[in-house]
């Protein structure tokens, strides 16, 4: 469900040549009915950084990355316990970092995502992630709860998130 820009491989290879795992930019395609929410998502995570910026491993996304094969094999692939939506890329990035990987943002390695996902569907996905895969991530990667600011989802956390809890749109952690 992705198409890539003409110079996609060349731009990824330049970043990889500097010893970095190259994380490219992802845009939602106009043809798939790009929404305001999708435009917002294009500015989050790695995509909010400048070209060449060193990125934390939690920003790793497999939909647009170039990773040396030996490094990828050294972490053993995806954790097959993560059978639901979300967190598998973050887990992979954290395990790659444990093997010494460094991550760099590469806005020129552009991929177009041909997927239509509403805000409501995103919230449903996040609920599934919180219930199933987030506990696996937090168990495997001690300290991640601080980095992800999980405390904001707990009683006494962010007022906005508490309102979401009260409205019935809660995450299960």
Image (cartoon, rainbow, N blue to C red):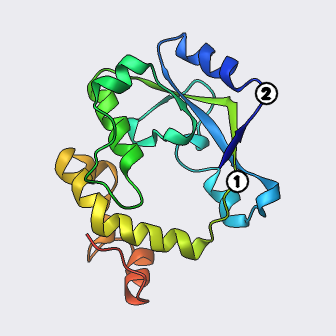
Evaluate whether residue 85 shows in this view: yes
Residue 14 picture quarter: top right
Residue that protrudes farthest toward the bottom in the picture: 167
Vertical side of 138 occupied by 102: above or below:
above
Q: Is residue 80 left or right of residue 27?
A: left
Snapshot quadrant of residue 2: top right
Name the residue at the top extreme. 17
Q: Is residue 6 left or right of residue 89?
A: right
Question: Which residue bears the numbered disc 1?
Answer: 114
x, y percent for residue 1: 65, 49
The reply to whether residue 151 is visible in this rendering is no
* Residue shown at the point (43%, 67%) measured from the top left: 126
The residue under the point 32% across, 48% down is 147
The x and y percentages for residue 109 are 67, 29
Which mark is on residue 6? 2
Quadrant of the snapshot with the C terminus: bottom left
Local SS, label 2: loop
Along the polypeptide, which appears first: circle 2 or circle 1?
2
SS at mark 1 in the image: loop
Location of residue 42 with respect to 72 vertically, above or below: below
Task: Say which residue appears at 38% left-offset and 44% top-offset.
Answer: 90
Residue 152 sits in quarter? bottom left
Residue 137 rendering spot, x and y as whole percentages: 26, 51
Q: Is residue 47 left or right of residue 69?
A: right
For the residues bearing labels 2 and 1, Cβ distance under 8 angstroms: no
Between 36 and 158, the residue placed more toward the observer is 36
Q: Residue at x 36, y 61 (%)?
A: 84
Q: Residues within 10 Å of mark 2 (few under 14, many from 20)?
A: few
> Mark number for residue 48?
none
């Amino acid at each position: 469900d992705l198409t890539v820009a003409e110079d996609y491989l060349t731009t990824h290879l330049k970043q990889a040549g500097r010893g970095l795992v190259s994380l490219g930019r992802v845009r939602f395609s106009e043809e798939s009915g790009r929404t305001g929410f999708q435009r917002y998502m294009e500015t989050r995570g790695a995509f909010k950084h400048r070209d060449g910026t060193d990125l934390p491993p939690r920003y790793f996304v497999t939909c647009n990355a170039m990773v040396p094969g030996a490094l990828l094999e050294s972490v053993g692939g995806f954790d097959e316990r993560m059978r639901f939506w979300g967190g598998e890329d973050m887990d992979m990035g954290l395990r790659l970092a444990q093997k010494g990987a460094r991550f760099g943002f590469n806005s020129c390695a552009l991929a177009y995502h041909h997927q239509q996902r509403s805000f409501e569907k995103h919230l449903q996905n996040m609920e599934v992630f919180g219930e199933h895969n987030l506990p696996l991530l937090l168990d495997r990667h001690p300290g991640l709860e601080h980095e992800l600011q999980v405390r904001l989802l707990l009683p006494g956390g962010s007022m906005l998130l508490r309102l979401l809890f009260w409205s019935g749109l809660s995450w299960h952690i």
